Image: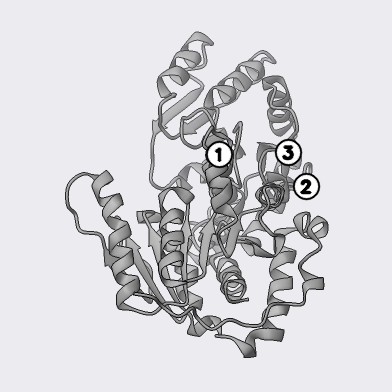
Amino acid sequence: MSRSSPARAPPPDESSTNDSEDSSTTSPRRWSDERRNRESSTGSAGTRADEKRVLVITGLAHKNHRHYGPLADVAGKTTLVALEPRYDVDDARYVTVPEIGPRLLRVVLMLFVALYEGYRNEYDAVASISLFPYGWYALVLKAVYGYPAHLGIIGIDLDHHAEQFYGPVPRWAFRRFDVVSVPGTDHARRLAELGVPPDRIERLTNAIDVDTYRPLEDDAADGTEDATGPVDADYDFVWVGRFGPEKDPVRFVEALDALEGTDREFRAVMVGDGQLRSEVEAELAARGLEDRVDLPGWVDEPLSYYRRADAFVLTSERDALPLVMLEAMATGLPAVVPAVGSISDVVDDGENGLLLTDRNPVRFAEALTRCLDDPAFRRRLGENAVVVRSQFSLECAGEDWRCILSTLEG
């Protein structure tokens, strides 16, 4: 059954969108500002964001609130076709994939549930995050019903899928979406190089809950924590993430080993789990660091570990814009991080963290030494780091969704 395409606003002035060299290097926040200006100038010809009906295809489960809660706040009607829903998105309607058979069967069934929902009700757009499979499903709904389609890029889309032998297929798919959203400038540049028109690339804030991730003294001021003065940290350094190759947890062990060689005292904690855990344990034992580094395993909420540490460390070989880094900075921790992905959009070396262009363990050890030897400098970095709370809030994500919905119509 065919569907008429939703009403479209007139396209923006080509002079404002066709300068690919300029647009591909423009910061994501500036893109959003430009889109807001365009929306205010053309919005009367189209459908306002708060009147839009958006169909979401998601398998994110516990992450639905962070990714799609801001969308539901600004759209007129949001419906989630959800694989494993937790009903925590206010003002959204859920359509649940039946719990039949193994997960793989349910993933396949999800497409048919989404198609049926698109048949039963009219929508103005379809949204997805992650190309495999949810982005592909969004493209199917676009082909069948004419709904403008959105894809939210995650790291694996560009860092893995687009680089494999089948890479031409996902690269072709990126160009089929009406909007592709990214967390920062690195992915925006790479998408533009793959032929995605810059005027279809939008920022989508990797949002944090600023009511949860905030400095301990803010809790004390609100009476949610005892205001008993400064508390000595249990750990000098906290590392949080999946113990997988892309996060490179062994690199952190190597950095600590190099730090050990300077005869400085320190304590560290590595929060997480994954395929490289046994290798991490073996490396710690081989280097005599097992008494200096705690391995609590996977925790659903790492806030307490941020609060018990003096600095956050990331050793990723590849990354986009890590949520754990933003969370740690929001609680007042300086970030010692490599210049990969869009991290340099956020971390300004010597201002709110230490940004390393070289992932050599010795370079990491030098940065960690600086944190240990100069507490005043470390504290200043942490005080500056909390500005991320005003840049990566759920409200910022909501404004980004307004721009995405405007571009979907344009």
Report if residue 276 is visible in the image. Answer: yes
Observer-nearest of 57 and 224: 57
Identify which residue, 107 or 269, lies in the foreground: 107
- CA gap, disc 3 to disc 2? 8 Å
Q: What is the secondary structure assignment of the residue under circle 1? A: loop
Cα distance between the residues tagged 1 and 3: 34 Å
Q: Residues within 10 Å of mark 1 (few under 14, many from 20)?
A: some
The disc label shown at residue 351, or none = 2
Q: Is residue 359 above or below residue 306?
A: above
SS for dot 3: strand
The Cα–Cα distance between marks 2 and 1, rounded to whole angstroms, is 38 Å
Q: Element type at marker 2? A: loop
- Examine the image and state in which quarter residue 104 appears: top left
291 with respect to 93 (left or right): right
Q: Which mark is first along the chain, 3 or 1?
A: 1
The residue positioned 76% from the left and 68% from the top of the image is: 17
The x, y position of residue 296, in whole percent, is 40, 32
Image location of residue 50, percent across then percent down: 51, 83
The residue lying furthest to the front in this view is: 1
**Does residue 85 show up?**
no
Q: Amino acid at mark 3?
A: Leu
Position of the C terminus, as image quadrant, is bottom right
Q: Which mark is residue 399?
A: none
Judge whether 335 appears above or below 57 on screen: above
Q: Give the labeled residue for mark 3.
A: 354
Q: Which residue is mark 1?
A: 167
Q: Residues within 10 Å of mark 2 (few under 14, many from 20)?
A: some
Going by the image, does 217 lie left or right of 37? left
- Look at 59% across and 40% down and name the residue there: 319
- Where residue 198 sits in the image (x, y, percent)? 71, 60
Which amino acid type corresponds to the residue marked 1 in the rendered image? Gly
- Residue extending furthest left? 100
